[in-house]
Image (cartoon, rainbow, N blue to C red):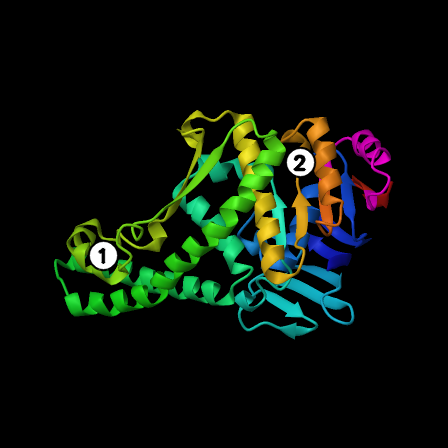
Amino acid sequence: MFLSNLKITNFKSYTDADVDFCAGVNCLVGNNGVGKTNLLDAVYYLSFCKSFFNSIDTQNIRKGEEFFAVHGRYEGLENQPVQVSCIQRRNQPKQMRYEQKAYKAFAEHIGRIPLVIVSPTDQILITGGSDVRRKFLDGVISQTDKLYLDNLIQYGKALAQRNRLLKQFYDDRYWDAPAIDIWDEQLVRFGQPIFETRRKFLETFIPIFNDYYNWISDQRESVEIDYQSQLIQDSDLAKLLVEAQSADRYAQYTTVGPHKDDLDISLSGMSVKKFASQGQQKTISLALKLAQFQYIFDHTGLKPILLLDDIFDKLDLTRIKQLIKLVGGDRFGQVFLTDTQPGRVQQIFSELPNVEHKIFNITPEGISIA
């Protein structure tokens, strides 16, 4: 599967663009601020129905315009090319279409065109709060397991309702246990399988991560990932919710459940969040993303599109060559990468003649083939 053509209108910095890509490595080269990352974000939109960088869709409409449109043609999904479109108009709902058919719910599209992005912001997987690591977990699993995604959505709705009641009861100096029990049942119904799926996922994912980390780091250190969940010690969520009702009542929010899960990542027994260098944190975050690619491919049979945004900031040139040789081989599928130096990517590919690639010059005037 690969994106053979991308057409965008009024998207971020672009008025119009119409680009044909190769099935191998596509290099977007140009100075900072000319729109390389905006092109990657357009590709991301077609997989996730949203921007990676800005969650407010209307802010991705080019200034002064009334809409944006992103259209992609994909090869290898079905017996013939498939058209996927995303259109956002001001003051109107976003439209996502697959072969001209609009989705009733965007969740129906997730996983249909799997994608993994490696971004300069990935270090937040290490330095950020537990919500960032849960989002990463959910993003990987949701592209391979529709039931998990549905459970996640329903759990989030039930959690919001329970928290709303807790705050209302606190403000009104009132307590209605049966009303809370109703939402407890929903949290158990959807939360218990979320926990079980995450635990099972990590049993498979962690060895894949270790393989990629060892490759990137030359096996200099050992990294451990430990699943932190209140359900590890007592896997009965219903019991935990009952025991926590008193605490929840005064906290005004739900203090137990899979929405509190986290991943504890350590390097040779030391917390990477506190003690790892920036270089080590970058290596770990890159290994997490490459493992995400491998896991999705192993469980769907589709090679995700891989977006590498500004990877030259993450690795030295020797490791970059090894990475491009890896992702340009049979193990990976279509790749998009950005760089500010055209000579650098040309040099790398001159040493990798068997890697299919296409280099694009990105300037304020437009997009051209190098």
Which residue matches tag 2?
A: 310
The quadrant of the rendering that contains the N terminus is bottom right
Count residues near mark 2 (Cα–Cα under 10 Å), then give few for <14, some for 14-19, many for 20+: some
Q: In this rendering, which labeled residue sits more in front, label 1 or label 2?
A: 1
Q: Quadrant of residue 213?
A: top right
Residue 116: % across, % down? 61, 50
Q: What segment is highlighted magenta in the picture?
A: 338-359
The question of residue 136 being in magenta is answered with no
* Residue 331 falls left or right of residue 262: right
Q: What is the count of numbered marks?
A: 2
Residue occupying image coordinates x 41% and y 53%: 199
Q: Could you tell me the amino acid type at mark 1?
A: Leu
Asked if residue 329 is positioned above or below residue 6 in the image, the reply reads above
The quadrant of the rendering that contains the C terminus is top right
Asked if residue 369 is positioned above or below residue 109 in the image, the reply reads above
Q: Nearer the viewer, residue 289 or 268?
A: 268
Q: Secondary structure at mark 1?
A: helix
Residue occupying image coordinates x 62% and y 33%: 216
Which residue matches tag 1?
A: 240
